Image (spheres, rainbow, N blue to C red):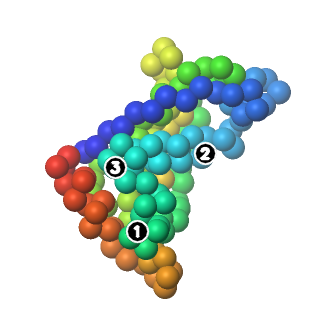
């Protein structure tokens, strides 16, 4: 299992009239978690696309709202991989407030596509190599 955390402060422009983090922005916070997790492993989306010819489109997103996050809250985005990717990769997400209480949770499933043919492929070897020590 591999777990990564990243902190993000809620900006004014991300909130609704009640100063709550707008519900539609949680998918963007999930993306931040995924991108920063890969970066912590020495891999970027740009690197996967340009150097390894792999796209990672989202296939499925689940999101549950537990309590509101508010303007200027410092949130911790926890991203967990519970199994090695194969034809797909599942990121389990939890977003916590400064008190450590869960604000939101969910999961995102992505697949791997060949950049040129747009056909499904297995996870890139470079990704598996850096993840194997954690499983």
Point out the tag, 3 or 2, that comes first from the N-terminus. Answer: 2
Mark 1: give few (<14), some (14-19) or many (20+) Cα within 10 Å. few
Residue 59 is left or right of residue 54, and the answer is right
Q: Position of residue 115 (x, y in %)?
A: 48, 76
Q: Is 103 drawn above or below residue 118 in the view shown?
A: above
Residue on which disc 3 sits: 42
- Can I make out residue 6 in this image? yes
Cα distance between the residues tagged 3 and 2: 21 Å
Task: Return the mark for residue 28.
Answer: 2
Q: CA distance from mark 1 to mark 2?
A: 25 Å
- Measuring from the top left, give residue 23's x and y in whole percent: 68, 38
Q: Secondary structure at mark 1?
A: helix
Choose the circle earlier in sequence order: 1 or 3. Answer: 3
Most extreme residue toward the bottom, as rendered?
Answer: 117
Compared across the picture, whether 124 is left or right of 103 comes to: left
- Counting residues from the start of the chain, the first of labels 1 and 2 encountered is 2
Q: Position of residue 106 (x, y in %)?
A: 49, 44
Residue 20 shows up from this direction: no
């Amino acid at each position: 299992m591999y777990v990564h955390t990243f902190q993000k402060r809620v900006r004014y422009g991300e909130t609704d009239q009640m100063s709550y983090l707008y519900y539609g922005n949680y998918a963007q916070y999930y993306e931040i978690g995924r991108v920063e997790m890969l970066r912590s492993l020495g891999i970027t989306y740009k690197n996967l696309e340009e150097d390894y010819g792999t796209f990672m489109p989202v296939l499925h997103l689940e999101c549950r709202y537990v309590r509101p996050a508010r303007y200027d809250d410092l949130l911790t985005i926890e991203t967990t991989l519970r199994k090695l990717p194969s034809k797909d990769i599942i990121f389990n997400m939890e977003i916590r407030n400064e008190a450590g209480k869960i604000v939101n949770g969910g999961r995102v499933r992505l697949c791997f596509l060949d950049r040129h043919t747009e056909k499904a492929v297995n996870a890139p070897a470079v990704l598996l190599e850096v993840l194997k020590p954690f499983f």
